[in-house]
Image (cartoon, coloured by chain):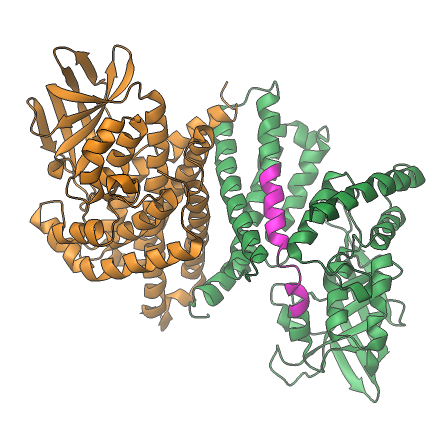
Chain colours: A green, B orange
Amino acid sequence: MDDLLAELRTWLSDALPKWKAKWNGDTSWDALCDWQRMMAEGKWATASWPVEYGGRGLGTMDVLAIEDVVAASGAPQIPGMIGLKNVAPTLMKFGNDEQRKSVVRIGSTDEVWCQGFSEPGAGSDLANVRASGRLEGDEFVINGQKVWTSNGMHASHMQLLARTNPDAPKHKGISAITLSMKTPGVEVRPIKQINGGAEFAEVFFTDVRVPVANLLGPLHEGWMVTMTTLGHERAGVAVFAGRLEQRIRGLIEDVAKGDTRISPVVADELAEMYVEARVLGAMARQMLNKIAQGGTPSSEQSVIKMVWSELSQRVDTVVMGLAGVEGVTGDNHAAALGYLSARSATIAAGTSDIVKNIIGDRVLGLPRD
Amino acid sequence: MKNATTTEAERAEFRASVRDYLSNASPETRVRSVIDSGTGLDESTWKGLAADLGIAGLLIAEEYGGQGMGMPEMAVALEEAARSLAVVPLLASSVLSTLAIQLSGDEEAFKKYLPGLADGSEIMAFAGLDGAGTTTLARDETFWGIYGTKTAVLNANIASRFLVVASTPDGTGLFIVDGSAGGVVVNAQDALDLTRPTALVTFEGSEGTRVGGDFTDGLKSLLSLGRIATSAELLGISERLMEISVDYAKTREQFGKPIGAFQAIKHRCSEMFAHVESMRAAVAAAALVDPEDTAALHEQALVVKAYCARFAPWIAEATIQVHGGIGYTWEHVAHLYLRRVKTDEVLFGDALACRDELQEILGLTA
């Protein structure tokens, strides 16, 4: 692994300055896609993919080590994470010959994929998908609405969940369908978030016709196909936890070095967060060790997600508190932005309330309501 | 004492054998009958743990009759003993007194005292905490004379010797005082924890044997190891309380369904689980710290105790809440655990005290 990381560092020391010189501080979507293209050509963005798709066939721990080195180099975020991490592995596993051709284009950003999962009536209760995909001859006719679609404004393609059998129980009648966002009848609108950003979209479908060949995986088995997709990022939550521990350490160092006098109450609040961060970090490292030894984490994921969500939200609340009046006057914009953005920590990828239900039902075996 | 000498799989096997033994030797009925006897010691269970399972000597080197293991293994024993509520002096004798002697570095004392501790034939008590507003002194007379009062001395009523921390003219010292020495007065306290008696022990010029030299650093390490040990107990109890609560939530019906189907109860149980898993990770990480790396040991011990001392009481209280009225009865086991938890919480510093020390390490104090 040391050789691999040395190769990566050499590659970064050449590629990153070239990209910076070309874009000169520009962090637009096009500039970020250009960086992803370079990262994919170097087989770094696609390191987890099999060799035949232009990857390196590396396991979770190697990929995490690569991501750490890339992050430490100050490289920008890769824009097409959903395509790289979730859609491409699903296409490789379930796609037909035509669908699998998209994989390489996802790496290069020639195609940008989004996932049409959540709906106004299917958020935490994702299986409650209502968008319909009526089979008519050799076409699906799609009607309905998707919401909270990440990268929806930039996407060229979508992996869609639609109800193809309205009479089956709710997990059984769903299919995964791929389509171009340029298909007639598809309309995309941005969602403006409480933090002013617009990283999500609403997507409306009005009699959108796609060929049956766009079915991904077996008919009516979209739930299984999707769960496989979501399962690809199982180590992700442990990485987030490790970064949160680092962030809290950094915040405390800054406060300790700074000139601002803090009250004993705030000092205790920081110490309390430090304790929780250290414990969360220990839990995350133990989960990663388990993966490294070939084990499969189970309940750890839900617990780490639950603890991470609430602790990361708390950090931004404390940072906002430390900012005092500057947090509300625009003088400390970063604190306000962090505070507003942190509201999503206990909502995205399963609200904390639902995570507690999942732990209760699936881990502890408590009776369902 | 060594760092981890066993693998995770070996520790799992060890845990299973301890749990198996204790579930037979020390069921709740046994615990209650020992409590009612007022002796403060379940002799046959202690013999089984010490002699048959070798637990009393886990931290003692093989040349002195022990197992030559370290905190990762002792943490397992402490978790299991605490979850069974066995009335044995594991913490006082096999952890605190044993470690105090070892941290003194006094090889004569190793030879003299460790074999008896290793097979459990001798029980010692650690007298570290001075009575409110007092300082225990050691005066160099014709012998070392110990003057002072120690409080919350665990298992003092069954100890043959006391490990006493006292202030000497040249710094902090560690002394061994025979229980039968002149001027030793043991007054039983009305201990909250029914499974582990405490006493106020007064030394009125009692003769002490000095063990090792300056004990300032030794005491600091001992306090750290005490924090990890009490955290392991808190973990073992918390896990058991979570199991009891979940079982009850599955079977107790109100309003026509098991109460665990109600989200208020379900979420409480899920939060218990998250805290238990966090405590497990924290105790494992702390037990694996190399005890020679005193700075890391100090910091990790504060972290683990700050966490466990905050959330184990929450879990014990939540257990009573989940059980409703039955949880408030003497007959239910919940209060036996709550009493033990509240005691472990304050030994070697509660969460607030640990965070206070962490603030200093982190540079957060003005």
| Quarter of the image where one finds residue B69 | top left
Picture residue at 63% right of the left edge, 68% below the top: A126
What's drawn in magenta, residue-wise?
A: A228-246
Whether residue B109 appears in this view of the structure is yes
Query: Is B136 part of what is drawn in magenta?
Result: no
Q: Residue B18 or A138: which is nearer the viewer? A: B18
Determine whether A139 is above or below A308 in the image. Answer: below
Screen quadrant of the N terminus of chain B: top left
User: Can residue A194 be seen?
Assistant: no
Q: To which quarter of the image does residue A172 belong?
A: bottom right
Residue situated in front as seen by the camera: B206 or A82: B206
Residue at 21 percent of width and 62 percent of height? B24
Along the line of sight, which residue is nearer the eye, A333 or B186? B186
Q: Is residue A64 left or right of residue A18?
A: left
Q: Position of residue A212 (x, y in %)?
A: 82, 82
The outermost residue toward the front is B63
Which of these two is toward me, B98 or B206? B98
Provide residue B68's location: percent of width, then percent of height.
Answer: 32, 43
